[in-house]
Every structure is written in C-alpha cells, then in structure tokens.
C-alpha cells in the first residue's frame, strides 16, 4: 500500500480515528525506530505500543508469529468478538471497536465465579465459558498469567477451538515469564511481549492497531 501524500510512515490516517497528537506522536516514533523489518500491520502494532507505553525499548521484546497480525485483522473484519482479562482493557478497546467493525468486546469476568477456585483465578476459571459463548474470539491477556496458562491448557486438550489470535502480554513477575514461554511454544497465532512487561493498556493498544489498520485499508480499497 503506497503512502498517502504527507504521511511519512507509509500508513494511512483518518480524522475520525486519529487525534492530531496521536498522528504527530506516531510520526516521531516511526522516525526514532527506523527500519524494523516488520510488515506494515506489525509496524502499526509496535508503534502504537510504543505510543501507549512511552517506551521505545518495547521493540526489543515484541514478537509475532508469522501471519498472526493479518489473521487477527481478518477475524476482526468478520466481526469476531474480543475477550479481555480486565475491564480496563475492555474499556480501552471498546471505543475503537465501535468506530470500526462494531466487534463485541467482553471481559472474562462476565463469566467468572463469585469466588475464586482453590487453584487459579476467577479470570482463568471463566475462560471456557467465555470461549464457548464467543467461538472465534480474539483473546487479550494483559494481567493474568493464570488465564493465559488456562487458555493453552484448554486448547491443547481440545476443549476449545484455537483463537484466531492471542495477544499475550501479562505483566508482572509471578508466573509471567513461564506463561509467555508456553505461549511461544504453543504454535497459536500470537502477538506477545517477552519479559515482565505488559498490561491492559498494551494489549488494548495492540488490538486497536489492528482494528485501525483493517478499517483504513478497507477505506482505501473502497
């Protein structure tokens, strides 16, 4: 896709989606990052993560499986639901979803038991119910490594269908690195952050970048 006039990032923009401060921030981030070798939709994810986190070094920890971001955009275009592990992430995704493909956005806690099970967390316990209610949903994990582990267990056991995309960015130090290593080895289409960094804002930024990219490509293609 050729760059519109005056847009040095090679990406398109739309006033309904982009605040001028965001546009200028992305222009600066693009220049600072230089040639990353990423595909255009992957570059969008990286730049939006850097914008949201205020941290250029996120580029060193960001990982994509081949075709994962494109698969995520295809699913979003088809109206796939978006499941998040926190209300904060859901709140950050919902406005972009409304302005683009009107994808349903839900937090796993909508299916959580009132009391946490003896092992795991309420979020992890909710996963199977949420995925059965919304087959084909994208899954965003920014806070709960237990939920990411549970997702991988359910998929490996054939109890739920593999999601079209997992954005795995749980934040913290207990169980986080292990859950990300297991995600990396799972073969699932994924976008993940290595190490201890992550959080609701970053998983929301990643899927918002995909929503924006797909929507603007559709506008350009007519």
Image: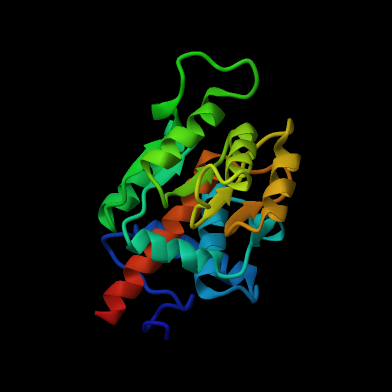
Q: Residue at x 42, y 35 (%)?
A: 107
**Picture layout, residue 74 above or below residue 11:** above
Q: Along the line of sight, which residue is nearer the eye, 14 or 133? A: 133
The quarter of the picture where residue 94 lies is: top left
Residue 11 image offset from top left, x and y in percent:
43, 74
The quarter of the picture where residue 35 lies is: bottom right
Residue 178 image offset from top left, x and y in percent:
75, 41
**Picture layout, residue 171 above or below residue 62:** above
Q: Residue at x 49, y 46 (%)?
A: 139
User: How many numbered marks does the figure carry?
Assistant: 0
Q: How is the image coloured?
A: rainbow
Asked if residue 27 can be seen in this view, the reply is no
Specify the farthest residue to the front.
158
The quadrant the N terminus occupies is bottom left
The quadrant the C terminus occupies is bottom left
Asked if residue 131 can be seen in this view, the reply is yes
Residue 86 image offset from top left, x and y in percent:
47, 33
Residue 115 image offset from top left, x and y in percent:
51, 13
**Picture layout, residue 11 above or below residue 65:** below
**Quick check: 72 left or right of 147?**
left
Q: Along the line of sight, which residue is nearer the eye, 186 or 108? A: 186
Q: Along the line of sight, which residue is nearer the eye, 132 or 94? A: 132
Q: Residue at x 51, y 45 (%)?
A: 160
**Quick check: 87 left or right of 173?**
left
Q: Residue at x 46, y 54 (%)?
A: 207
């Amino acid at each position: 896709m050729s760059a519109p006039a005056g847009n040095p990032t090679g990406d398109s923009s739309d006033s309904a989606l982009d605040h001028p401060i965001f546009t200028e921030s992305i222009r600066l981030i693009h220049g600072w990052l230089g040639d990353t070798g990423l595909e255009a939709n992957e570059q969008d994810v990286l730049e939006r993560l850097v914008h949201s986190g205020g941290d250029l070094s996120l580029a060193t920890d960001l990982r994509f499986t081949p075709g994962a971001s494109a698969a995520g955009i295809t699913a979003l275009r088809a109206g796939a639901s978006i499941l998040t592990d926190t209300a904060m992430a859901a709140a950050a995704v919902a406005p972009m979803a409304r302005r683009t493909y009107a994808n349903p956005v839900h937090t796993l806690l909508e299916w959580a038991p009132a009391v946490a099970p003896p092992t795991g967390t309420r979020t992890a316990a909710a996963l199977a119910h949420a995925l059965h209610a919304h087959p084909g949903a994208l899954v965003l994990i920014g806070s709960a490594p237990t939920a990411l582990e549970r997702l991988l267990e359910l998929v490996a056991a054939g109890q739920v269908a593999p999601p079209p995309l997992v954005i795995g960015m749980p934040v913290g130090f207990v169980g986080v690195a292990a859950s990300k290593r297991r995600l990396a080895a799972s073969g699932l289409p994924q976008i993940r952050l290595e190490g201890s960094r992550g959080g609701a804002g970053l998983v929301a930024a990643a899927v918002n970048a995909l929503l924006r990219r797909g929507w603007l490509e559709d506008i350009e293609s007519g």
